[in-house]
Image (spheres, rainbow, N blue to C red):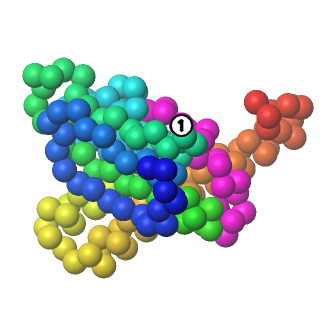
Amino acid sequence: ADGPVSPLNAVWCGHVRQRIILPQLGHVVLVFPLGETAVICANTSLEASQYLMLAAVPDGQPITLGLPDPQAEAAPLLVMWLSPAFVAELAQFLNIPENLHELLQGMPLLQGDPVSAIVAEVEAAYRAHRSPDAIEDLFLEVVGEVLRLMRLRHQTLQRLARRRDGTTED
């Protein structure tokens, strides 16, 4: 992973049966458990009701993904990689800091929000063998929703900053 950062977005839908290594090429990575089995991703325990957003790791270290219990049933997952250039371009379009996703680094988020609802549609599209164009449209909906949520968090931080010195830095 010493080469140039990949400009490509990617989606992988599959099962984790043992510890695996996910490439980390500067992407923002979203990890969504699809079943009832918990997983450990980047040293963060992730229940089936949660998902994880991982900011780009500067040193390019790969992401380790596995099961907390080696005897556990295989965990179905959907993993999305958002390229740095893609995130930067969309953040600029929405007028939000391009590193805003770092606020959520390694923090499990509850499924049931608009992001995970669209991810469920992506999974269904994969299982139904829908066209790549249909899956790409859903992928872009997920990205749009992630960025919308980041923008809302940014606006909230800006409102707080007007009330208290140092909030933006904090």
Residue drawn at x 17%, y 44% as measured from the top left: 15
- Looking at the rendered structure, the secondary structure element under dot 1 is loop
Task: Please tell me how many numbered marks the rendered image carries.
Answer: 1
Answer with left or right where residue 65 lies relative to residue 154.
left
Expressed as whole percent of the image width and height from the top left, the position of residue 148 reads 57, 58
| Position of 66 relative to 125 (above/below) | above
Residue 28 visible in the shown view = no
Q: Residue furthest front?
A: 2
Question: Which picture quadrant has residue 151?
Answer: bottom right
Residue drawn at x 79%, y 38% as measured from the top left: 168
Under mark 1, the amino acid is Gln
Question: Which picture quadrant has residue 158?
Answer: top right
Q: Is residue 94 magenta?
A: yes
Residue drawn at x 71%, y 44% as measured from the top left: 156
Q: Give 63 or 160, whichever is nearer the viewer.
A: 63
Q: Which residues are magenta?
A: 91-109
Residue tagged 1: 105
Q: Give 79 or 37, whichever is nearer the viewer.
A: 79
Answer with left or right where residue 47 lies relative to residue 165.
left
Expressed as whole percent of the image width and height from the top left, the position of residue 19 reads 23, 32
Q: Residues within 10 Å of mark 1 (few under 14, many from 20)?
A: some
Residue 167 visible in the shown view = yes
Q: Is residue 153 magenta?
A: no
Expressed as whole percent of the image width and height from the top left, the position of residue 165 reads 89, 31
Question: Which picture quadrant has residue 141?
Answer: bottom left
